[in-house]
Amino acid sequence: MTVMMILQLCVVLLALYVGSRYGSLALGAISGIGLAVLVFGFGLKPGSPPTDVIYIIIAAVTCAGILQASGGMDWLIQLAERLLRRHPNAITFLAPLCTFFLTVLVGTGHVVYTLMPIIVDIAIKKGIRPERPCAVASVASQVGITCSPIAAAVVAFVTISNANGFDITIPGLLMVSIPACLCGLIAAAFCSYRRGLDLDKDPEFQAKLKDPEQYHYIYGDSATLLDKEIPASAKHAVYIFLGALAVIVAFAAFPDLLPEYSSVRAIKDAQDIVFGTGEVVTAKDIAKTGIAIEGFTEQHMVGIKMNLVIQIVMISAAALMIIFCKAQPKKAVSGAVWQSGMVAVVAIYGIAWLADTYFSNYMDQMKLMLSDIVARYNWSIALVFFLVSVLINSQGAVVVSMLPMAYSLGIPGEVLLGVLPSVYGYFFIPNYPSDIATVNFDRTGTTVIGKYLLNHSFMMPGLVCISVSTVVCYLLTMIIW
């Protein structure tokens, strides 16, 4: 690794670090500064922004935002709350399952903001230390991203894998990621079940209760959505949303159902074609125009790609909810789901473009440095995914920026699928919005960011969950493939 490579890598890491300190849109925007330094300062060839993934996120987030605006999200939260209040003693296990499946359904972990106050309220009323269900539930809300058919990380993995010769579908991916992540969550919940002191035995908590204001703050208000009347239109919006997911999964499982269209492909890629005007082009260039030339190109039928299917279905579902379910677009734009999704778009846009610019310019050197290690220990790429996730706070961005490099190193697609859960590592440094919000929602103060930053409430459940999930996912993939 040359001095120039190290210096440019420092630029990349510095941009990611500074962006993560500012948070929100800054992560993608400050990545643009790093990109400018690499391109204009060091003269590197610009990489390619991940447009396909960005379009899918926009479509999915628009649909989920419209669902929230219709009131459908409140109904889903209400159903989860009924389950939790019916079985309060099992909240340490049920809370993460609720946040997990909500994320699987809507493709974003930011739905946790509505459910977390309810989890805290149930735990307090039952005398259960809120840290136990809250920390693992926050982790679960992010783990569900690699199990959602409309999440950017899942779609990007399938799209990039297919382009690199690993024929995997969205249902095939979910077939291993969902059971693996559920195993990890159950393991984390077991480790959290007796974590810390019970509230009635915690001296710090009992000292707080002696203050009347603190007592009222902790026990005075109840967070609930059970008293909110859900209109029929909101329920219809949920049915439309679930129907859209079913259509996407069906098309992914049975690609023969997809419509086909005629296309032109080159049959003599390397041969130049000289026209009467003196213009010289290749057969491949001609194929891109869609014009068939006998002897150089041929007509063939191709199916529509899944990334386009997802976009069409999600946008159509959003339109149906607007027309038939009284969903207000202005309300969707101001909602937490749509706003957080757009932040993710900017983050992935900047981060992935920055990473692709660096790695695409040094791919040969990277292969030379890492080929021996990767050849012996294919699974070690999981550590790379995890560490990158710690830096950039986005599973979709990790997949988009690192997966092409992993394939170029010769790592089989089966191995990469097996380590997919490792793309979630941003619980390690507790600066992610859902973790910070969880700390603020816990009125007892048991869910904490420790004095030394890394000794926080999310570290143990996060490490247990991701370790177990990755091992189980790897084993399942090896058995199936």
Image: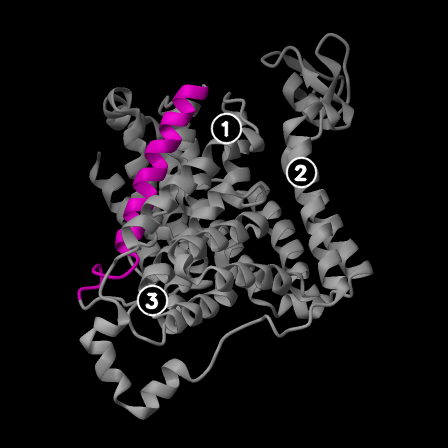
Residue 457 counted in the magenta span: yes
For the residue pair 89 and 27, the one nearer the viewer reads as 89
Residue behind mark 2: 248
Residue 477 counted in the magenta span: yes
Residue behind mark 3: 128
Distance Cα–Cα, label 2 vs label 3: 40 Å
Name the spot of residue 97 as percent of width and height, x first.
Answer: 46, 51
Q: Most prominent secondary structure in the magenta stretch?
A: helix
Residue behind mark 1: 161
Name the spot of residue 311 as percent of width and height, x first.
Answer: 67, 44
Quadrant of residue 372 within the rendered picture = top left
Q: Secondary structure at mark 2?
A: helix
Horizontal side of 350 relative to 43 (left or right) equals: right
**As shown in the figure, which amino acid type bears the numbered disc 2?**
Ile
Q: Nearer the viewer, mark 2 or mark 1?
A: 2
Q: Residues within 10 Å of mark 1 (few under 14, many from 20)?
A: many
**As shown in the figure, which amino acid type bears the numbered disc 1?**
Ser
Q: Is residue 439 positioned above or below 8 on the image?
A: below
Lower sequence index among marks 3 and 1? 3
Name the spot of residue 342 as percent of width and height, x first.
Answer: 56, 59
Residue segment shown in magenta: 452-480
